[in-house]
Amino acid sequence: MIWLIGIGGSLGAAGRYLLGNVINKKKKPGHFPLGTWVINITGSFLLGILYKLHLTNEISDWMWLFVGVGFCGAYTTFSTFGYETITLLQLDKKGLAGIYVLSSVIVSIATAAFGFII
């Protein structure tokens, strides 16, 4: 089963990289990290849906491992979130860093819950 997580993770990491590049194409340092924000929000939403489907046995264990654990685990990125927050703080953009942290956490949890509910 570990290979399912690895393949899913490879696809999730590639998806994160490609989508992040598209969203951040013209982003300058010190601006809101929209790419990572969108990726983490959409990943949280997808994980909420998948978790509910897994709990209700509507998807198999292998699908949960492949998409939920592998893909979503690599697609969403806490390390980049931390790095971008520190970068904003170093650029003395404390307010923007606060908005980024709060909105990331609150909206990610809300979209995961929404995905779970629907």
Image: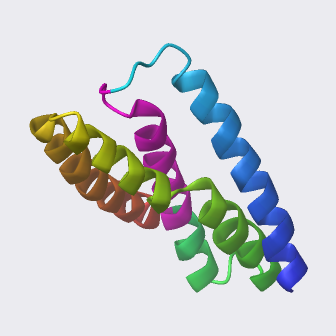
Extreme residue toward the left, this view? 95
- Residue 24 sits above or below residue 54 on the image: above
Along the line of sight, the residue nearer the viewer: 48 or 84:
84
49 shown above or below 86: below
Viewer-nearest residue: 42 or 7? 7
Asked where in the image residue 108 lies, by quadrant, the reply is bottom left
Q: Which residue reaches farthest front?
A: 90
- Quadrant of the rendered image containing residue 76: bottom right
Compared to residue 79, the image places residue 16 above or below, namely above
In the rendered image, the quadrant that contains the N terminus is bottom right
Number of callouts in the render?
Answer: 0
Q: Quadrant of the C terminus?
A: bottom left
Identify the magenta region. 30-48
Residue drawn 61% across the image and 23% down it: 22
- Residue 79 at x, y percent in the picture: 47, 59
Residue 96 lies, in percent from the top left, at 17, 35
Q: Is residue 29 left or right of residue 14?
A: left
Whether residue 4 can be seen here? yes
Q: Is residue 27 left or right of residue 104?
A: right
- Give x and y (percent) for residue 65: 74, 78
Identify the coloring: rainbow
Q: Residue at x 37, y 44 (%)?
A: 84
Q: Is residue 109 above or below residue 100?
A: below
Residue at 78% across, 70% down: 66
Horizontal side of residue 88 vs 83, given as left or right = left
User: Is the magenta region chiefly helix, strand or loop?
Assistant: helix
User: Is 38 in the magenta?
Assistant: yes
The answer, for residue 59, to whether it is visible in the render is no
